[in-house]
């Protein structure tokens, strides 16, 4: 199942992506928005990211004006990798090298046709494992480290940051 969502700026592109996916006979869950009424990207980005994290959907596509806000919001959900992409090449790399479960697109950056090509390429690509798996595992370990620190109420990394700031004067 593919989760999709957008803010008001990405609504038209999201609608076309949904139609594209349905034509491909993909299973799609639309998390909204459902109109061009003003909406905030974090509200939708977090819904899709949570669904990916919890498992009701396998992956997600988010659309806002630039794709950046959605990526930032989705990446706040522990365990989720969201990559802003603006080309087929970046979409392939997001999956192949980074195993991104979510891609984000900018309605002001890519055309509808480009968006559909990007989504199609991303879905057709598999994670390559190998050296990329080691790197992705390290990123997941960083995520887990900070998640545990938050849960324990500690400020992990504070000593290192203090040392770096002091060294810079």
Image (cartoon, rainbow, N blue to C red):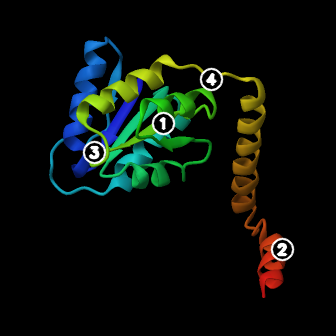
Q: Nearer the viewer, residue 70 or 92?
A: 92
Q: Are marks 4 and 1 in contact (CB under 8 Å)?
A: no
Query: Which badge, 4 or 1, comes first in the chain's sequence?
Result: 1
Query: Which badge, 4 or 2, comes first in the chain's sequence?
Result: 4
Q: Residue 34 carries which label?
A: none
Q: In this view, does 92 lie to the left or right of 12?
A: right
| Residue ID for mark 2 | 159
Label 3: element kind? loop
Query: Which badge, 3 or 1, comes first in the chain's sequence?
Result: 1
Q: Do the residues labelled 1 and 2 touch (CB within 8 Å)?
A: no
Picture quarter with the N terminus: top left
Instruction: Kindly report the distance in space between the C-alpha atoms of the residues bearing marks 3 and 1.
Output: 16 Å
Residue under the image location 76 percent in, 68 percent down? 154
Q: Residues within 10 Å of mark 1 (few under 14, many from 20)?
A: many
Instruction: Kindly report the distance in space between the C-alpha atoms of the residues bearing marks 4 and 2.
Output: 35 Å
Residue under the image location 26 percent in, 45 percent down? 10
Query: Which badge, 2 or 3, comes first in the chain's sequence?
Result: 3
Q: Residue 127 carries which label?
A: 4
């Amino acid at each position: 199942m593919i989760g999709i969502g957008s803010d008001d700026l990405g609504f038209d592109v999201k609608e076309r992506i949904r139609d594209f996916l349905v034509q491909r006979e993909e299973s799609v869950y639309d998390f909204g928005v459902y109109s061009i009424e003003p909406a905030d990207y974090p509200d939708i980005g977090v819904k899709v990211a949570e669904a990916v994290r919890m498992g009701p959907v396998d992956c997600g596509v988010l659309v806002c004006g630039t794709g950046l806000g959605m990526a930032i919001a989705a990446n706040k959900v522990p365990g989720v990798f969201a990559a802003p992409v603006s080309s087929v090449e970046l979409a392939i790399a997001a999956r192949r090298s980074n195993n991104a479960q979510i891609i984000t697109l900018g309605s002001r950056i890519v055309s509808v046709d480009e968006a559909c090509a990007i989504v199609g390429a991303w879905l057709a690509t598999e994670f390559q494992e190998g050296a990329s798996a080691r790197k992705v595992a390290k990123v997941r370990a960083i995520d887990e480290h900070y998640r545990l620190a938050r849960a324990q109420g500690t400020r992990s990394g504070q000593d290192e940051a203090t040392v770096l700031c002091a060294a810079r004067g």
